[in-house]
Image (cartoon, rainbow, N blue to C red):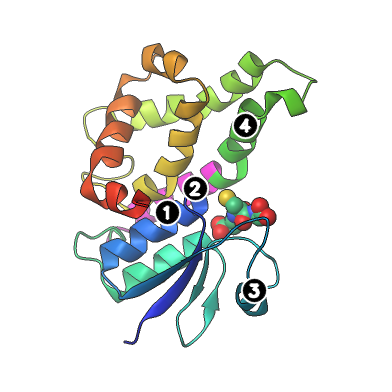
Amino acid sequence: MSEVTLYSFRRCPYAMRARMALRYSAVALRIVQVSLKAKPAEMLALSSKGTVPVLDTGAGVIDESLEIMHWALAQHDPDDWRLQGNLPAQQDSAALIEANDRVFKVHLNHYKYAERYPAHSMAFYRSQGEVFLTDLEQRLQGRDALVAGHLSLADFALAPFVRQFAHVDRDWFEQAPYPRVRGWLGSILAAPLFVAIMAR
Ligand SMILES: N[C@@H](CCC(=O)N[C@@H](CS)C(=O)NCC(=O)O)C(=O)O
């Protein structure tokens, strides 16, 4: 396969998860760092909705991060991120990612930008997000991954968002009652894969 191109923004959690899957799959990749304030015309010509990440595979354009992850894993999936042959785990994974993207992400935004949502306090928005953290904490009982016995798609799809949640108030997160989530997140963020996709 010839080189594929990813339009990306370094700190965007959706772009991070796409970059992790693409790097893991070892496809030859050209990354174009875009400014969200001045998106390149070539990217908007590929996808008019104007969000990152956007992947140009040469055979088509994918402008949803989760679909980019699936595309990457279809190329190469050496550690079975797709949990092939385990349909219940695949369904659990899909539901967990959907809960992240549709519910936790909303609470994360409210918590992170609480001053823009004066209806409630920052602590209130944080407690809404903690419902999800509590689920993750329970999932990590007796294993080091969210869905299966090893890290898989959901772990990498969620980690950038949990990272953002943790970074809103690091002192709070360090003492919050989610020690397994802390350990899980810490090991993903310290691993060579994440370090590589965040390199400048
Ligand atoms: N559902 C999309 C969401 C992507 C998204 O919202 N990306 C943000 C940056 S983190 C973006 O590009 N926003 C447009 C902007 O800020 O102009 C995906 O999963 O790829």
Q: Which residue carries the number 1 mark?
A: 17
The mark lying in front, picked from 2 and 4, is 2
Quick check: is the Cβ at mark 1 less than 8 Å away from ligand 1? no
Calculate the distance from the C-alpha at mark 3 to the C-alpha at mark 1: 19 Å
| Marker count (numbered) | 4
**Image side of residue 50 versus residue 34, left or right:** right
Amino acid type, mark 1? Arg
Q: Viewer-proximal residue, 103 or 110?
A: 110
Residue on which the image places disc 4: 107
Cα distance in 3D space between marks 3 and 2 = 19 Å
Between discs 3 and 2, the one toward the N terminus: 2
Rounded to the nearest whole Å, what is the CA distance between mark 1 and mark 2?
Answer: 6 Å
What is the three-letter code of the residue carrying label 3?
A: Ser
Are circles 1 and 2 on residues that touch, CB within 8 Å? yes
For mark 3, what is the residue? 47
According to the picture, the residue beneath numbered tag 2 turns out to be 13
Mark 4 or mark 3, which is nearer the start of the sequence? 3
